[in-house]
């Protein structure tokens, strides 16, 4: 009776280990190609180093077929006229690495980064995920497809041994390999020694001994190997047999929706910039959608020629994953606020938000569609000006024009205020700016005035109503208001609010009752 | 025994050439209307302003057009719908709209031709800068210099002599020499002022407003759109092509939006569903100390969808209903009388 219990406890405390290794070779070249789909069908080389001592550090398959090799100088590379040459961008690589780690984090919270200079490698602890994603082979294919959607071609290997998974991913580039627990040695024996990170001395030694594959290395006697190569020899033998143990050190990839791209040449036209933004936006939307999120706001930062930067933020009323909507909003915003110099680099930083859900009622009033309204408002803003569209919010002040204009949003709920008054009230039409009038006074009251080159006789004048600034603030205004009812000689009726500026002694027509 | 329907068919068949379908009641189309909130006008219009059509409010300034439009918007916003006010002359006063009952959070305000949308800060009491600059100490007779010692008496004399001899020394008008920079390059302020003046031209503002209205109609969802051209002179308003109003009419019908057009002169012609002509108001003189309100009058000039009484044209002219209304708008401070 005790045995199953002990077994169960053993299983719970020591679950079966299973690792999936994601490895992307030629990472600098793949990163550059990721946001430049127009270069996918062309030979492509990435140069690294300080000019003029640049060397080819990464290239695609078409460039390799041309004969381009690692370590070629720029002059040598330029002898291939069909090859496109770009300078390595560490910032773009860092952004792409964080994107891939974040993608790996969607399959398991335990991810270890094993990247080296020009290869991206991460190992995911997928033990216990079978009920979520299915058997390891299905999961491995899912991982590869997800990574491919991000623009990176990677190989995926699944093994119960950490290092065996890494070696298999290195040995089978671009493929999905799954080996059952206990079969590591058989799976590794045909792989060449290059899948191990051998030092030059060790590689030379094994070459002298005639050891070319991991299987041959695994067959070597342990004690004799240690006596000749020390503990390093023992480690290499365990790696070749798939028995090397590893202490898993997980990283915690931060979820940040950021894409950065350094342009090959400075761009001045907005239309050509939008092609680049479109590709970057696609990536952001894909990543947000993988977490069932939508983009709430997008901040675009343009690095300008001359060292400056231009930052704009677009925030629609509701989070959205509609690519056309985002592109249109960014287009309109950049059109209204163009950068002052040529653009060298673009950074898109998005803020995630929950997907909007609105339950509409059968009898609820017809309201504008939020996404469409955002585009409409942006278009109107481009016509009439930035601060001239929105809803008016009154300030708690007696100052003339005491209001501010805020962005217009649609509330689907019931109206806040209830209309209680049924009596018609007179409305005022504010004259902005107030128009000057010439006033003739009689007993310190307006008797007649000239307004819009017409003479009016005052029938009734009510006032003066004096208003001035708040005594607690340095703002100062002091005016006398008169409500006047006037009629011109041709019978034109006028009913308005005359204002006498105390400080300057001028008269102005501020508003008309209509 | 023939039935009633059979007899009706026989009579209609006999009269079909003179009176088509003489005994069949005409199909009645009930067109939706929205109340204005002013009972006198609602009574004349049999319920209110038409939905999905253009209503033109024509009248001079101070004739009550704005009050009616805001009252209508108050009725629309109170049921949770949203509206837009396209302000050609930037004349709307939000305080006034709120006092009438408009829910400002549901009113989109498009201000056209705003010269300076940023609120100008009111004048602050500040001493002029020259008060903080200490006056230069005049040394010597001509600003040159002298000192306590005869040796320093001639210090600064070389700077003082040109001012003494070559400066203007008479009352004759002096020719002003403009610097080359000021004469050739216009200043930034000058460019800004020119742009503002160009924007303030009526036609530029109207173009902005018409484009904005087009966009709002395309977006849909706005139950009422007020195009306020009430302060635009008729010679400008009449220049709007009739095709624009026809397009607006079709868009309003499609999106079931009520378009209110405030003008001084009829512009929309046959595209208008309803034309109301306002007369100049007369002031109420209830109080001697405060302005209490105005009495307005309005007449229906044109009603496109007037309900037809019957499909038989009577021999005599039927009695005409009252197509005019009067109402009084009282200020909030005037009390309840």
Image: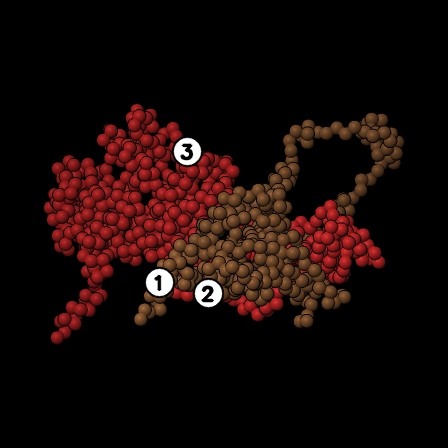
Residue bearing mark 3: A265
Q: Is residue A46 visible?
A: yes
Who's the residue at 48% across and 50% down the image? B249
At x 58%, y 44%, the residue is B238
Look at mark 1 in the image and give the residue it sits on.
Answer: B9
Given contact means CB atoms under 8 Å apart, are the residues at marks 3 and 1 in contact? no
| Residue A12 placement (x, y as % from top left) | 21, 66
Spatial CA distance of label 3 from label 2 is 50 Å
In which quadrant is the N terminus of chain B drawn? Answer: bottom left
Q: Colour of chain B?
A: brown
Note whether residue A229 is visible.
no
Which one is in front, B44 or B90?
B44
For discs 3 and 2, the disc positioned in front in the rendered view: 2
Instruction: Please state the chain letter of the residue tagged with numbered disc 3 in the rendered image.
Output: A
The disc placed on residue B189 is: none
Q: Image quarter for residue B302?
A: bottom right
- Residue B114 in percent (x, y) is at 60, 47
The answer to whether A145 appears left or right of A268 in the picture is left
Q: Colour of chain A?
A: red
Q: How many marks?
A: 3
Identify the secondary structure beneath mark 3: strand
Q: Position of residue A36 (x, y in %)?
A: 34, 38
**What residue is shown with label 2?**
A413
The residue closer to the viewer here, B96 or B177, is: B96
């Amino acid at each position: 009776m005790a045995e199953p219990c002990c077994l169960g406890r053993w299983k719970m405390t020591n679950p079966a280990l299973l690792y999936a290794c994601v490895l992307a070779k030629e990472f600098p070249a793949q990163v550059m190609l990721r946001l430049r789909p127009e270069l996918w069908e062309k030979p492509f080389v990435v140069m690294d180093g300080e000019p003029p001592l640049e060397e080819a550090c990464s290239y695609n398959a078409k460039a390799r077929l041309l004969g381009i090799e690692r370590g070629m100088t720029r002059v040598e590379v330029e002898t291939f006229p069909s090859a496109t040459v770009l300078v390595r961008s560490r910032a773009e690589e860092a952004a792409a690495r964080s994107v891939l780690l974040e993608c790996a984090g969607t399959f398991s919270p335990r991810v270890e980064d094993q990247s080296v200079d020009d290869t991206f490698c991460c190992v995911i602890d997928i033990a216990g995920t079978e009920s979520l994603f299915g058997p390891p082979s299905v999961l491995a294919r899912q991982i590869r497809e997800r990574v491919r959607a991000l623009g990176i071609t990677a190989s995926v290997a699944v093994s119960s041994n950490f290092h065996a998974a890494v070696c298999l991913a290195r040995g089978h580039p671009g493929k999905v390999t799954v080996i059952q627990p206990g079969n590591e040695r058989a799976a590794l024996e045909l792989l060449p020694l290059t899948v191990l990170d051998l030092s030059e001395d060790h590689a030379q030694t094994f070459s002298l001994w005639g050891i070319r594959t991991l299987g041959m290395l695994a067959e070597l006697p342990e004690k004799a190997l240690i006596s000749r190569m020390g503990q390093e020899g023992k480690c290499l033998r365990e790696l070749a047999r798939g028995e090397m143990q590893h202490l898993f050190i997980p990283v915690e990839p931060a979820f940040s929706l950021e894409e950065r791209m350094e342009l090959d040449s400075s761009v001045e036209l907005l239309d050509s910039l939008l092609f680049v933004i479109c590709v970057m936006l696609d990536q952001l939307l894909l990543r947000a959608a993988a977490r069932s999120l939508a983009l709430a706001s997008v901040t675009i930062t343009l690095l300008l020629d001359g060292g400056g930067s231009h930052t704009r933020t677009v925030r629609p009323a509701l989070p959205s994953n509609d690519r056309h909507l985002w592109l249109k909003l960014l287009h309109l915003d950049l059109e209204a606020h163009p950068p002052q110099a040529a653009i060298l680099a673009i950074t898109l930083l998005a803020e995630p938000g929950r997907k909007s859900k609105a339950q509409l009622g059968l009898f609820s009033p017809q309201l504008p569609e939020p996404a469409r309204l955002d585009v409409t408002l942006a278009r109107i803003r481009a016509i009439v000006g930035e601060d001239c569209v929105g809803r008016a919010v009154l300030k708690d002040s007696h100052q003339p024009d005491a209001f501010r204009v805020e962005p217009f949003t649609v509330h689907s709920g019931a109206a806040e205020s209830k209309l209680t008054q049924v009596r018609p009230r007179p409305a005022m039409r504010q004259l902005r700016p107030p128009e000057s009038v010439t006033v003739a006074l009689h007993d310190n009251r307006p008797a007649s005035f000239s307004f819009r080159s017409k003479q009016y006789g005052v029938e009734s004048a009510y006032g003066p109503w004096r208003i001035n600034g708040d005594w607690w603030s340095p703002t100062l205004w002091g005016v006398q208001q008169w409500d006047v009812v006037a009629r011109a000689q041709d019978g034109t009726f006028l009913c308005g609010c005359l204002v006498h500026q105390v400080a300057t002694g001028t008269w102005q027509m501020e508003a008309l009752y209509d | 025994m023939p039935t009633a329907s059979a007899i009706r068919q026989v009579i209609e068949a006999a009269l079909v050439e003179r009176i088509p379908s003489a005994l069949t009641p005409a199909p009645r189309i009930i067109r939706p209307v929205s109340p204005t909130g002013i009972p006198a006008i609602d009574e004349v219009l049999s319920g209110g302003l038409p939905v999905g059509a253009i209503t033109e409010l024509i009248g001079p300034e101070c004739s009550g057009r704005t009050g009616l439009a805001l009252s209508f918007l108050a009725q629309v916003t109170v049921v949770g719908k949203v509206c837009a006010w396209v302000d050609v002359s930037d004349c709307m006063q939000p305080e006034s709209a709120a006092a009438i009952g408009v829910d400002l959070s549901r009113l989109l305000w498009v201000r056209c031709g705003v010269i300076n949308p940023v609120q100008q800060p009111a004048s602050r009491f500040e001493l002029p800068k020259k008060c903080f600059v200490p006056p230069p100490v005049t040394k010597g007779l001509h600003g040159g210099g002298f000192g306590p010692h005869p040796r320093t008496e001639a210090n600064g004399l070389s700077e003082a002599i040109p001012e003494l001899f070559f400066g203007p020394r008479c009352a004759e008008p002096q020719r002003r020499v403009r610097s080359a920079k000021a004469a050739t390059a216009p200043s930034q302020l000058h460019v800004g002022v020119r742009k503002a003046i160009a924007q303030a031209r009526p036609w530029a503002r109207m173009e902005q407003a018409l484009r904005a209205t087009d966009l709002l109609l395309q977006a849909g969802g706005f139950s009422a759109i007020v195009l306020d051209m009430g302060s635009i002179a008729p010679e400008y308003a009449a220049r709007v092509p009739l095709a624009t109003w026809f397009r607006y009419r079709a868009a309003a019908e499609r999106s079931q939006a009520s378009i209110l057009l405030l003008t001084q002169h009829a512009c929309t012609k046959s595209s208008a569903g309803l034309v109301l002509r306002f007369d100049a108001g007369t002031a109420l003189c209830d109080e001697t100390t405060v302005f209490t309100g105005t009495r307005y009058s309005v007449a229906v000039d044109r009603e496109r969808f007037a309900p037809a009484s019957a499909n038989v044209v009577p021999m005599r002219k039927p009695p005409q209903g009252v197509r005019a209304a009067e109402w009084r708008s009282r200020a909030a401070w005037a009390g309840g009388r």
